[in-house]
Image (cartoon, rainbow, N blue to C red):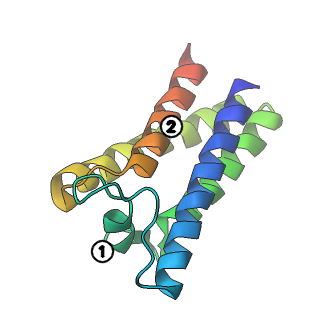
Amino acid sequence: MTIIILACIGFCISLYAYFVESKMKADPTYKPACDINDRFSCSKPINSQYGAIFFLSNSVWGMIYYVGVATLAYMHAHSALLTLVIAGVIGSVLLAYLLYFKIKTICVVCTSLYIINILLLLRMVL
């Protein structure tokens, strides 16, 4: 049950990121609540060259990922779920590197998702 709850939280945060991204595309003057200052910004990574992978925004991939995690947890497909969660943590490490060292900002939304992915892995192995 914990895994499904974490997946739902991750889905909601990814949905918020998608909302922010859509709102910024529609209104370039829009300033999201997650943009605290230049150092703490969610719009910088969304607008960066790393904001999309394979023609889909990272927020859409996040929503797909968390639906997959919740579905596999519901189906009790432990091996497939563990594989997906490990892939999610590896992806989080790569995206965190890009965020902190290439984009050079702290994204509260992104970091929250990285923490959720680590919690998912910890829940799977403990």
Residue at which label 1 appears: 49
Q: Where is residue 66 in the image (x, y as percent from the top left)?
A: 64, 48
Tag of residue 117: 2
- The residue at the point 58 percent across, 51 percent down is 13
Three-letter amino acid code at the position of disc 1: Gln
Q: What element carries label 1?
A: loop
Q: Quadrant of residue 22?
A: bottom right
Q: What element carries label 2?
A: helix
How packed mark 2 is, by other alpha carbons closer than 10 Å (few <14, some 14-19, many 20 or more), is many
- The residue at the point 51 percent across, 21 percent down is 122
87 or 106: nearer the viewer: 106
Q: In this view, does 93 lie to the left or right of 61?
A: left
Q: Is residue 123 left or right of residue 54?
A: right
State if disc 2 and disc 1 touch (CB < 8 Å): no
**70 w.r.t. 57: above or below:** above
- The residue at the point 47 percent across, 78 percent down is 24
42 or 3: nearer the viewer: 42
78 or 36: nearer the viewer: 36
Q: Is residue 35 left or right of residue 73?
A: left
Q: Which residue is the extreme one toward the top?
A: 126
Q: Position of residue 87 (x, y in %)?
A: 48, 44
- The residue at the point 59 percent across, 21 percent down is 123
How packed mark 1 is, by other alpha carbons closer than 10 Å (few <14, some 14-19, many 20 or more), is few
Q: Quadrant of the C terminus?
A: top right
Q: Which of marks 1 and 2 is nearer the N terminus?
A: 1
Three-letter amino acid code at the position of disc 2: Asn
Total marks drawn? 2
Q: In which quarter of the image is the N terminus?
A: top right
**122 w.r.t. 41: above or below:** above
